[in-house]
Amino acid sequence: MELFLIAVGACLVNNVVLSQFLGLCPFIGVSKKVDTAAGMGGAVIFVVTIASAITNLIYTFILEKLNITYLQTIVFILVIAALVQFVEMFLKKMVPSLYKALGVYLPLITTNCAVLGVALLNVQKSYGFISAVINGFGTAVGFTVAIVIMAGIREKIEYNDIPESFKGTPIVLLTAGLMAMAFFGFSGLIK
Amino acid sequence: MNKAAERLKCGIITENPTFVQMLGMCPTMAVTTSAINGIGMGLTTTVILILSNMMISALRKIIPDKVRIPAYIVIVASFVTIVQFLLEGFVPSLYDSLGIYIPLIVVNCIILGRAESYASKNNIWLSMFDGIGMGLGFTVGLTSIGIFRELFGNGSVFGKHIMPDSYQPVSILILAPGAFFVLSCLIAVQNKVRLTKLKKAGEAISVCEREDGCATCSNTLCMGKSYTVESVMGIKEKTDKKMTVAKDLKEKSKTDSDKEV
Amino acid sequence: MSRESMKNTFILMLITLVAGLLLGLVYEITKEPIEKEKLKAKEEAYKAVFSEADSFEKMADVPDTTGDKIKGMGYDADIDEVMDVKDQTGNHIGYVLTVTDHEGYGGDIQFAMGVREDGTLNGISFLSIGETAGLGMKATEDSFKSQFAGKNVSCFSYTKSGASAQDEIDALSGATITTNAVTNGVNAGLYYVDSLK
């Protein structure tokens, strides 16, 4: 039950993009079409879940054991960068179909601050292994939900009559703001 | 010296990271709930930017081209952690209010962007001024957004109540949606100014084609202006296959941005 | 592996090593100020909730602080520390508790509360709170905190329609979860002090 609450909380109540402002760049950059948005979302789910698991293991079994938790930022970012490379190579060899679908988005994820953000939040909230993975997964699903909804809306508003100066990024941000308000509605879900 | 002054002006006004280049949007939106947070985040980033710019410039001849991005990340991450300790020890209130956004400065694309586009090509002295200019530009951006949101969302500035008691604060401005709304309007105003200027000059309207702007930012997707797959690809060996992917993506992004125009 | 990639790897490793060593050094240097700062912040919070106190002493033999008893009352809170408060002549005049409540909207809320010997709540002061700016964060303002001060009740409750009784607190508008968390934390503390006697 608690794990379920963590997942729902990470996905809807504290949506990464709309309430924590992490991963805004891809959220705005890759949300022009639903299928690319979904591809990006898939890649993020994949990487964030694995990154949560690995960073959690590294933190508990290496950093904490050696009493060097102060190295966490530097270690996490390097692990994430390496992980993305590794995942890419692995997929290319073992699951070419998945690689084809996600390949383009993988390298773009290293600097997506949501990945590092989730890893750090897991430590901050002192989650255990399973909670950390669930939290990572929930967060990434939240990202995907937000970016796919956004892409759907953007495909529609493409044909709308928008004031000249609001075209492009401003209207996207405005839409995101309205979505953030809508997501407030979820805050009642958890207690 | 002249060149140094020019770097300052460039960072604060002509290429202001927040208002003109729109880099580092995550912290911009997340911490600007109050003016003091904005200024704190801005100055913290400035210090890290100056240090990392100088260090990367000093090591620019030593760092091999192929592993430069991971090398930059290591350097930036170390400085971020050092600054984090200093804040925790000496300015704990700021440390508490910025929270997780301090370690996340590592992936702030202003820092890696400047490293890649300026510090890796220029001497220490100029890189330092570039860092100061860009950092202060970022600080000015964050502080002004912070002042705006705090003034109308809470009726105060820097924690002091200045609005009359009859003023009912628009709390939504301090909440998450407010960040999106404020930034949206800000960019719209800026677009308006640019559009009128361009119309007057009779020029075609172009979207961010500056070479040292977003294009070199390693955060790749800054505000959807342009993909910089190359810089990300630089992390690893560039295989042919990936190069074609990069090329495809680049072309795609080009058509996308054309559409936006 | 070609020679070039060996060289690249070596340089990258060197940079990482130097960075790591440097971090270790800075960590050692800043460790003490960070500890000191934390202690100072705590001390200030203690003073704020018990201004006439002369000394605070951590009580060693205190009954189970995280016990099921508190949870049994419906409060998801822990008592982290119990301080024995003495005046200048060394008389025991009350307690200062550090309470962490786990029901906050943005995670745990930690605060210090001072309770007089007769059970009067002297006041509360937040040590760590990460609620939403503009809503839950308003809990740190005096207008909210002062509602608890100087009251001798066994249990607080909050209301949205204007406090009318001694033991009623005006809820923060739009932040019922935060109000609930703080009220529960205070109640847990009061209950705990009561059990000390």
Image (cartoon, coloured by chain):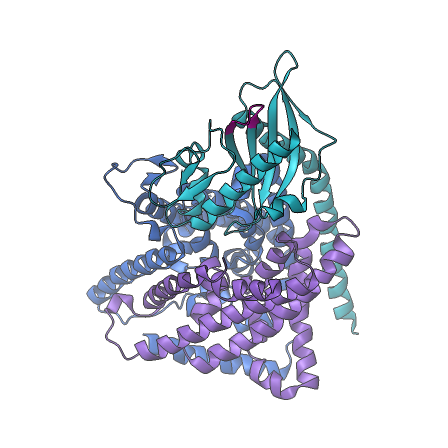
Q: Residue at x 34, y 64 (%)?
A: A178
Q: Is C30 or C12 nearer to us in this picture?
A: C30
Magenta span includes C117: yes
Tell me the quarter of the picture where residue B181 sits. bottom left
Q: Left or right: C111 with respect to B42? A: right
Q: Is residue B62 visible?
A: no
Q: Is C99 or B122 nearer to us in this picture?
A: C99
Chain C rendered in what hue?
A: cyan
The blue-tinted chain is B
The purple-tinted chain is A
Q: Is residue B241 visible?
A: yes
In this rendering, is residue B89 above or below B244?
A: above
Q: Left or right: C149 with respect to C95? A: left
Which residues make up the magenta segment? C115-122
Expressed as whole percent of the image width and height from the top left, the position of residue C159 reads 39, 44
Expressed as whole percent of the image width and height from the top left, the position of residue A30 reads 46, 74
Q: Residue furthest top?
A: C89
Tell me the quarter of the picture where residue B72 sits. bottom right
Q: Is B33 or B90 nearer to us in this picture?
A: B33
Expressed as whole percent of the image width and height from the top left, the position of residue B111 reads 53, 55
In this rendering, is residue A158 above or below C180?
A: below
Q: Left or right: A118 with respect to B154? A: right
Q: Residue at x 56, y 72 (%)?
A: A44
Magenta span includes A116: no
